[in-house]
Image (cartoon, rainbow, N blue to C red):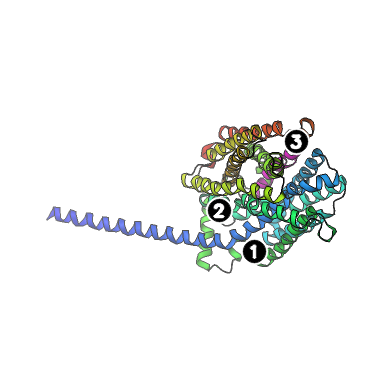
Amino acid sequence: MLAAGREKTRDKETNVSTVRVTHINTEALELQKLYTRVAWRIVPLLFLCYILAYLNRVNIGFAKLQMQGELGFSDATYGLGAGIFFIGYFLFEVPSNLILERVGARRWIARIMITWGCLSAAMMFVTTPTTFYVLRFLLGVAEAGFFPGIILYLTYWFPVERRGRYMALFLTAIPLAGVIGSPISGAVMQLLAGHSGRSGWQWLFLMEGIPTLIMGIVVMCILDEGISSANWLNTAQKRVLIEQLQREMGSKTSHTFGEAIRNVRVWILGLVYFGIVMGLYGIGFWLPSLLKAAGVQSPIQIGWLSAVPYVVATLSMVWIGQRADARHERRWHTAVPAVVGGIGLIGSAFYGAELVPALIFLSIACIGIMGALSVFWGLPTTFLGGTAAAGGIALINSLGNLAGFVSPYLVGLVRDLTRSTTLGMHTLAICLIVSGILVVSAIPAALVNR
């Protein structure tokens, strides 16, 4: 009888454990469904906005194919104009993100998109190096705060253990901007050249500036400020999402902007991001020219071939972001792709005159650069909270985006001096490799792999 009693007790304990596990699994499933709903609501809109942002930022790479010869610009002039965008961006990045936190994401992101859409379209009126420099600088001022604002906005919705996959999905807008925008840019320049007395590159700026202005108005109308203002969520769903965010707030090491500035790891991550962006804009601003140097002359063909590296990068960066989340490991998932990107740039320079090998290595470079980018922004958001997140993310982004000035100007200057992009590509590759080494040697795993 005693043995039978013990057996019944074990059966009851087993049943209770089974009920608990079932309850936990049900809760996890419901939570995942809720986050999937949130993602479908906000990520596609942000995704489309960033596609337009990236197109307006790098369409100068396609415009160069016609405007450089038509306006008599040297490679150094082009590189300076392409890069001076990031000086304006750097100067106004932190103030812009702090304003966003104060006035709200909806109004500020809409303001950014409307002003930069107008300025991007105005690029069609460039006639001299001075107007080129001024408009590119103002474009950087107008767009400052957009990208770090979106990164900050995602932290309003997703806790750190889920953020990587959704940031990766959002950041696929960069390669997809290349997939979509490259063929469109090439077609616009070739098919509309001479229409109504305007050059193809002028039509390019107009046709890619107006949609951004329209999307800014859409953002003003439909973007939610955060969980509390989302009328498509009920009270219970809002409470669950807010609790998930509050649970991680105690683990943040910096909450004020002053703490973020004094945090040496913020500056280290700025250097890491600088190296990644050196490679990113080396590809973004010079890919059409590299393909032309490899023997492709038609803007439409250059457009389609430019899409190839971005297609493979789109697939790989989502996988890398999901893998980093699943393993709770972010340092090596940033470092290894950065090194791979550097190797790809070295190979593309070595085979610069041969189309197929150059395209393969450019694709490898894109896989590495985009993969590192997809995980990188999961690093600072693990230890920055509150105003520190707004200011720290903007500070890291502004420091990193100085590479957007250095990278195209450096490559253009080297090309003017040597008649080759080889040395410039090697320099960008070294920056990527150093970034990979720096992130694993200077950022503690216990800090960012939570």
> For the point 73% across and 53% down, which residue is it?
56
The earlier-in-sequence mark between 2 and 3 is 2
Query: Residue at label 2?
Result: 166
Q: Going from the N terminus, do you reach mark 2 or mark 1 first?
A: 2
Q: Is residue 145 above or below residue 217?
A: above
For disc 1, the neighbor class at 10 Å (few under 14, some 14 to 19, many from 20) is some
Is any atom of residue 256 visible in this view?
A: no
Which residue lies under the disc numbered 1? 223
Q: Earlier in the sequence, mark 3 or mark 1?
A: 1
375 displayed left or right of 67: left
Q: Horizontal and vertical percent for residue 6?
A: 18, 53
Q: Tell whether position 299 is magenta.
A: no
Q: Secondary structure at mark 3?
A: helix
What kind of residue is marked 1?
A: Leu
> Between tags 2 and 3, which lies in front?
3
Foreground of the two, 346 or 142:
346
Q: Which residue is mark 3?
A: 410
- The region drawn magenta spans 385-412
Could you tell me if the residues under marks 2 and 3 are in contact, i.e. CB atoms within 8 Å? no
